[in-house]
Amino acid sequence: MRSCCACRRATRSPAARPSWPTCATAPRPTGWRCRPAKRSSAHCGPPLRRWPAAAGGAWFVLRARRRRRQAADLEMRDELTGQPDRRAVMAFAQEQFELCRRLGIELSVALVNLDRFKAINERHGQAAGDRVLRDFAEAAGNVLRGQERLGRYGGDEWLLVMPGTAIDEMPAVFERLRARLAAQSVHGLAQPHGLTLSMGAAGLTEGFESVEALVEEADRQLHRAKAEGRDTVRCARAGRVADAGSGDRGAGARRTPRDTVSA
């Protein structure tokens, strides 16, 4: 069937033109299909077959964009564990740092380290160490809430970003992580596997001017936790501006640079 009417297509020669005035009032010959024109009722609209082509083109464009987003997401994920890599988790930490500071929301970050992970690699092999990392990522994912993010910071070290969580809550977070790791079955290791972890955490206050400073403080607390026997957590927050006339510090004076909360 032809896609347009006789009054629009049959104009190559005067003899071929129809004798009726318009396609709207004329009898339609067999095999012709007419549609009302948008600009004029005397002419036909665009062929119907153009609309599926336009829709198909839009579908291909959307699919290409989706694939590019998926590829970008994969590029920022750790190949071994599937968790966000260092660049991705730091970008998320930066975003949450700015948002929480602007809105006055609590934010805590923590660095988590698997204790004596090097000994696992030496005793059981690198493949066993890789399984331990994957199983830890799975265990941590079962503990965290939707707005929290865990990313592989490097080696066996992980960065935990927890918006809406106060620094005083981090010992409880550590206990949940430790209990979940102890219950996690690790392929290649006998149960109980005896894996433990250490954590250093820092909470956002005005004493931290950048997310890098916040993570650096969490790293210092992690080293404290490991130096003090491992399998524990150490937390710190920057000092706030003291209230006017409080104590012997005077108005507007600051506390010591770091006030430490230990679990």
Image: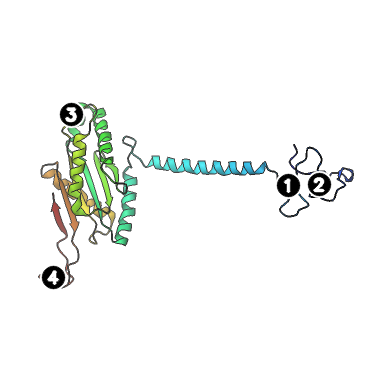
Q: Position of residue 103 (x, y in %)?
A: 31, 61
Task: Estimate the x, y position of residue 242 in percent, counting from the top left.
Answer: 17, 67
CB within 8 Å, label 1 to label 4: no
Whether residues under marks 3 and 4 lie with C-beta atoms below 8 angstroms apart, the answer is: no
Disc nearest the viewer among 3 and 1: 1
Mark 2: amino acid: Cys
- Label 4 to label 2, Cα distance in Å? 93 Å
Tag on residue 7? 2
Q: Nearer the viewer, residue 7 or 251?
A: 7
Circles 4 and 2 in contact, beta carbons < 8 Å: no
Picture coordinates of residue 54, whole percent (x, y): 61, 44
Front disc: 3 or 4? 3
Label at residue 132:
none
Q: Distance between the residues labelled 3 and 4?
A: 54 Å
The residue located at (27%, 50%) in the rendering is 162
Q: Specify the amino acid type for callout 1.
A: Arg
Q: In this rendering, would 68 be left or right of 168?
A: right
Asked whether the beta carbons under mark 3 and mark 1 sit within 8 Å of each other, the answer is: no
**Mark 1–mark 4 distance (CA, rounded to whole Å):** 84 Å
Check disc 1 and report the residue beneath it: 35
The earlier-in-sequence mark between 1 and 4 is 1
Image point 84% across, 44% down: which residue? 12
- Secondary structure under tag 4 reads loop
Q: In this view, does 61 lie above or below 184?
A: below
Screen quadrant of the N terminus:
top right
Which of the labelled discs sits on residue 246, or is there none? 4
Q: How far apart are marks 1 and 2 (CA)?
A: 11 Å
Which residue lies under the disc numbered 3? 191
| Relative height, residue 143 to residue 41 (above, below) | above
